[in-house]
Image (cartoon, rainbow, N blue to C red):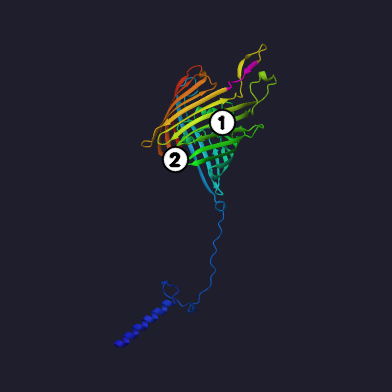
Amino acid sequence: MKKLLLLTLVAGICMSMHAEYNSDEITDAATPIDSASIAVESVEPEKSEKPKGFFNQVQKVLDDTQSDIKFGGYIIGKYSINDRKHQSSNSTFDLRLVRLYVDGHAFKDFYYKLQLQMNGAPGEDKGPRIVDAFVEWQKFKEFRVKIGQFKRSFGYENPMNPLNVGFGAYSQATTKLIGFSDRVGEHACNGRDQGVQVQGDFFPAADGHRWLHYQVGLFNGQGVNHSDKDNHKDLIGGIWVSPVKGMRVGGFGWNGKYVNEGYKASGLGSDYDSQLKSVKRQRWAVSAEYEGDWMVRGEYVWSKGKKIGRVKNGVDAEGVQLYKDSPNYSDAWYIQAGAPKFYGFKLMGRWDCYRDNKEWNSLKQIYEISLTYYFNKNLFIQAEYDITHDKTLAEDRTYNTFGVQVYCRF
């Protein structure tokens, strides 16, 4: 009887194993299978479809050219109030800047950037417009070539992003003598022009910084989004040394000319014309900066060149208005300092001066102090208090301004 039960159990196990081998589902990958005893249907592997659509094609191009691309932008909103008299309004909310940009690298050695300014009512040099559009070959640190529309290679402050200046506006040296709202009468250019520039850095130190920097460029002289109007090109360049990391001392030169694009001859002869056809821009600057936990920066800019608009100079015997040229020389300087950050706050101060005719009777000086709180590197708020003393005003030469700005970068 026991032998019969044992034989029955063995037969059941064998039948179970035979059924498992012939099952459609094989659950144990380690179980050996005799390929000769199992018919396997040959199946072509599924071919994955090639990516379709615009963005996939863009990504393929980027991959083929070893490119990367980044989109971003920033917004600066401002409120200011002052006690200056005889104005239509003493306070205003202002959308100071709205900018969008795309930048990146292509073919490993080329850097590109396109930046648009979006705020302001549409019009010539207003509203949506291109501010930066350039490509730079960066294969060698000692020799890089940039072509397109970009910041003029003059001064330390001009190339800085508005978010990093530390105050509600650039200094008068930058705005008046480096092409923001240039004293010669050039249209608003944000310190930029169209041209080509070479630059580089030599002599690397052990801490990674380089001892010597140079930059030199040829520009149209007419500012952003305007073509050349004569056969003269502006030559602008600079050189500085950096004896220790974070410190640099240098100088800049500018030999150029601006053509008055709105010139219309009066027909009465040059003595009666209210505008000049063109004006020279011959300028030099010296600059020094240290940037660490503490920071200090100072620049002095000297300028030779008249304004395109002449000033009234009485009338002749027949009652015809006479004009005279504007002053030929001007200068500007500023010194600013900043304390280390504490609990997210940054305190800065600046003494900012400009003389329109290089005489003390034309001095406009601004004493500024700002306190910035950083929520993070992309969002911060800034309060600023200024005392302005302007000798060119007939009255109310000294006035106070308080402003608040919010900076947001994305």
Residue 255 seen anywhere in this rendered image of the structure:
yes
47 and 139: which is toward the camera: 139
- Badge 2 element: loop
Range shown magenta: 321-328
199 and 109: which is toward the camera: 199
Task: Give the label, 2 or 1, closer to the camera.
Answer: 1
- Badge 1 element: strand
**In the displayed image of the protein, which residue is found farthest to the top?**
317
Please name the amino acid that badge 1 sits on: Gly
Q: Which residue is mark 1?
A: 253
164 and 292: which is toward the camera: 292
**In the displayed image of the protein, which residue is found farthest to the left?**
2
Q: Which residue is mark 2?
A: 378
Label 1: few (<14), some (14–19) or many (≥20) C-alpha neighbours in 10 Å: many
Please name the amino acid that badge 2 sits on: Asn
Give percent across and percent down for residue 187. Answer: 59, 30
Q: Is residue 322 magenta?
A: yes
Q: Taking 278 as reference, is 92 left or right?
A: left
Give percent across and percent down for residue 125. Answer: 58, 33
In the rendered image, which quarter is residue 184 located in?
Answer: top right
Report the quarter where the N terminus lies.
bottom left
Give percent across and percent down for residue 137. Answer: 57, 44
92 is higher (above) or lower (below) than 210: above
